[in-house]
Image: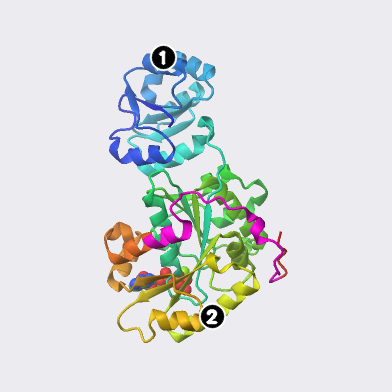
Amino acid sequence: MHRVVVVQDALGPLEPLLPVFARAGFAPPVFRESIAQVVEDARKGDVALIVLPMRLLQGHGRFEFEAMLRDAPAVASIGTAPSADAEAILVGMRAGIGEFLVSPPSPTDLEVALLHLRRKWGATGIRGSLTAVYAPKGGVGATTVAVNTAYALATRRPDARVVLVDLNVGLGDIDTHLNLPHNYDLGDLVRKLDQADADLLHAIVTPFGDGLFALPACDDLEVADQVQADAVTRVLSVCRTSFQHTVVDCEHAFGPRTVAALDAAESIVMVLQSNVAAIRAAKRSLALFRQLDYPTEKIVVVLNREGPGDVLSYADIAKSLGVPVSLRLPNAFQLANEAQTRGVPIAKAAPTAPLSLAFNTLATRVVGEVAVVDRPEAADGKRRGLFGLRRK
Ligand SMILES: Nc1ncnc2c1ncn2[C@@H]1O[C@H](COP(=O)(O)OP(=O)(O)OP(=O)(O)O)[C@@H](O)[C@H]1O
Ligand SMILES: [Mg+2]
């Protein structure tokens, strides 16, 4: 684990920030009273990150600190101040401070700062899992399943970061489900596709908190044209190198964008409800999945909104589909509605509700017990293409 040193009251109350440090691979912070003590820590070489109040850089401590940062280029630093005072920020930048935060920072602000600095402590690329949530019929709960599975993956391990990608170009709504004002979206990444890497992705995703990040769909129809299969493949590949888990809310249309996401995923969660239209559409999709040579264990069939009024039981549905129903999610209209109105995941609104527990089960079903799944893509072999997509 990396070591972070916090000087005086630089971060305010630490309790809400501890999970953020844990996700970035840090042990709980140690406290120091003066720059002199921090300089001593850095000399011993056992500190990866220093967080200090900018006001300490106003005296001659600044020169001592500057010299220390020069001698230990691998040490990352964050300066804090009660307000974003331009003068203080400038002094910090001159001293070599890497990031600035208004104190006390929110967990999400700290999370973003740690993402920006992560190269300093040698965070390397990973190969995370990729789950595509797909419903061939609209309105059956695909976005609800995507949002809540992503949240379950983010909260079940303290060190996991999860990104939820909305591929519903022009019609995205994960930002509504999570009540997430955002400055950037998928279009911003696609516009700079040739430069798309972990750094750009980290600058574009919006943190929700609890380790969950969102990449909302773009509304700009000019960019929408550029969001084609190869762009989707590239974006998802970058997501995998930066997040332990990526969950994709796919479009209902079975177009090239959707197939690119389904191809790249190692699990496809196919959502349906107990009605004839949804079951028919699911049957057609299963036939297409067979055409695409997806192994049956790649498909996780989820029956959503199961309830006592259902005309067809899950056993009838499984028989009609010719594949088992992997998971049944109970109908919880009031809870789902309340969570959506508040803009929070269902498990955040009601952690012990049967529907919340079912999403946890689904999370385990799609990625197994391990946080990072590393499966070679070679298995996708010489498959037949749809939409002229070339497979490698
Ligand atoms: N298990 C559930 N119990 C009760 N209501 C649910 C459940 N799952 C989803 N819903 C509700 O169903 C509605 C549709 O859900 P959602 O937006 O997730 O579907 P979708 O398939 O993504 O739809 P769209 O076609 O807009 O993409 C929402 O109002 C949601 O709250
Ligand atoms: Mg949706």
Tell which tag, 2 or 1, sits nearer the viewer.
2
Give the vertical position of 132 relative to 235 (above or below): below
Residue 264: horizontal and vertical position, in percent? 60, 59
Identify residue for label 2.
283
Task: Tell me the element at label 1.
Answer: helix
Q: Which mark is residue 25?
A: none
| Picture disc at residue 40 | 1
Is 277 drawn above or below residue 100 in the view shown?
below
Residue type pointed to by label 1 = Glu
Q: Kindly identify the residue that appears in the image at 69 percent across and 71 percent down.
A: 387
Say if 67 sits above or below 357 in the image: above
**Is there any visible trace of residue 168 in the rendered image?**
no
Residue numbers of the magenta segment: 361-387
Q: Nearer the viewer, residue 181 or 29?
A: 29
Q: Position of residue 241 (x, y in %)?
A: 57, 46
Query: Does the image show residue 308?
Result: yes
